[in-house]
Amino acid sequence: MNAKIASGATGASQIWYRLLGELLKKYKDGIMEKPDKVKAVTVDAYLGGLPRDGMPTRSEYFIDGSEPKEQSPYYKKLMISKSTGKLANDVEIKSGNYEEKDYIVITENDPVSTDGKNRWQEAIDAWARDQKDDKYHPPTEKSDASSDLVVVQIKSPSDKSTVDKGKIEIKGKIASVASIKTTKIYINGTEVKTLDGNISEFNESYEFKDEGVYEIRVRSWNEKDRDGDSVVKIGVGKPWDSATPTPSPTP
C-alpha cells in the first residue's frame, strides 16, 4: 500500500500502512497470533480449491475443517468426439471414439436478481468470449456422428473366463442415440431371453447346468432397425478353450 496514493492518505491510510509495515518486520505473514483452529493452506491462486498442476498457488487462512477438499469445480474434463469436435455422444463414448480435453467453465449465481436475469453469469460469459485460449470455449452441442449405430458390451462374465456350474449373471451396457427397441440374449446360438423396451443396461441370470464351452451373445436393435451385438466365450467347469464338444443350452 502506497501511503501517498491510497484512500484516506491524510489519516487512516498512513496509520494502516505503518502498522502493517511494523508487523511484517517481525511476522512474516503479518499476523501476531493465530487461533489454534486457524491454519494456512496452499490453494489454487486462480480458481480456488486445491492446487492444480501448472497453475499458480497462494496461501490462504481457513478455520480448521473449512479448507477446500477438492480442486475447483470450474475445471472441467469433457469427452470430445474425434469425428466432430463436439461433445461425444453415448455411442462414441462406448466405442472409444472420443478424447478427453480440459476446459475452464465458470458458473455463478446472481444473489440479488429480481427479474430472473443472472447478471453475474452474463458478465462471466462476456469475459470468457474475449479469452483467446481454447480452454475457455468448450463445445456445447452433442455430436451426431455414429447416430445410427448400436454398441453392446458384455461386462460379465468376462470373455475367455472359466466359471462354476450354476446361475451366472449376464451383465452389460447398450449405447444408441436412437431408442433401443429390443434386446435378445443367445446361448450357443439359441435365444434364451428377450428384453423389450429402451434399456441401457442388462442384468439377467442363466442356469448353466452342464459343464462345457458356451458362447454368450447379446444383440440389440434400435428404432431405426440398426443392430449391434457383443459375444463372449466361457468355460463352465472347464477351460474355455477345451476341445470337448460344446453342449446345447439347457432351457
Image (cartoon, grey):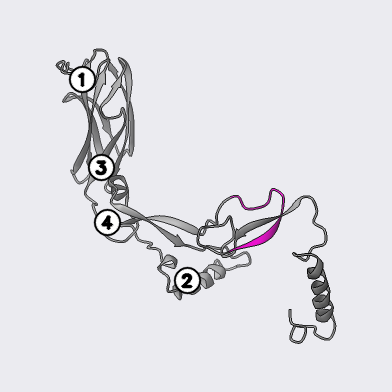
Q: Residue at x 43, y 70 (%)?
A: 133
Going by the picture, which residue comes out furthest to the top? 210
Answer with mark 4 or mark 2, whichever residue precedes in sequence. 2
Q: Is residue 223 above or below residue 53?
A: above
Answer with mark 1 or mark 2, whichever residue precedes in sequence. 2
The one of 137 and 12 positioned closer to us in this rendering:
12
The one of 214 and 25 positioned closer to us in this rendering:
25
Rendering coords of residue 130 (x, y %): 45, 76
Q: Which residues are magenta?
A: 57-69
User: From mark 3 to mark 1, how far is it between C-alphas?
Assistant: 25 Å
Q: Report the residue marked by disc 1.
A: 213
Residue 51: which quarter of the image?
A: bottom right
User: From mark 3 to mark 2, how far is it between C-alphas?
Assistant: 37 Å
Is 59 magenta? The answer is yes
User: From mark 3 to mark 4, how far is it between C-alphas?
Assistant: 15 Å
Going by the picture, which residue comes out furthest to the front? 25
Residue 77 in view: yes
Name the front one of labels 4 and 2.
Answer: 2
Residue 128's tag is 2
Locate residue 45 relative to residue 216 in the image: left or right.
Answer: right
Residue 103: which quarter of the image?
A: bottom left
Amino acid type at image mark 1:
Val
Answer with mark 1 or mark 4, whichever residue precedes in sequence. 4
Is 230 magenta? The answer is no
Q: What kind of element bears circle 2?
A: helix
Tell me if label 3 and label 2 are in contact, CB under 8 Å.
Answer: no
Q: How many residues crowd around disc 3 within 10 Å: few (fewer than 14), some, or many (20 or more)?
A: many
The one of 138 and 28 positioned closer to us in this rendering:
28
Q: Report the residue marked by disc 4.
A: 144
User: From mark 1 to mark 4, how far is it between C-alphas?
Assistant: 40 Å
Q: Report the residue marked by disc 3.
A: 151
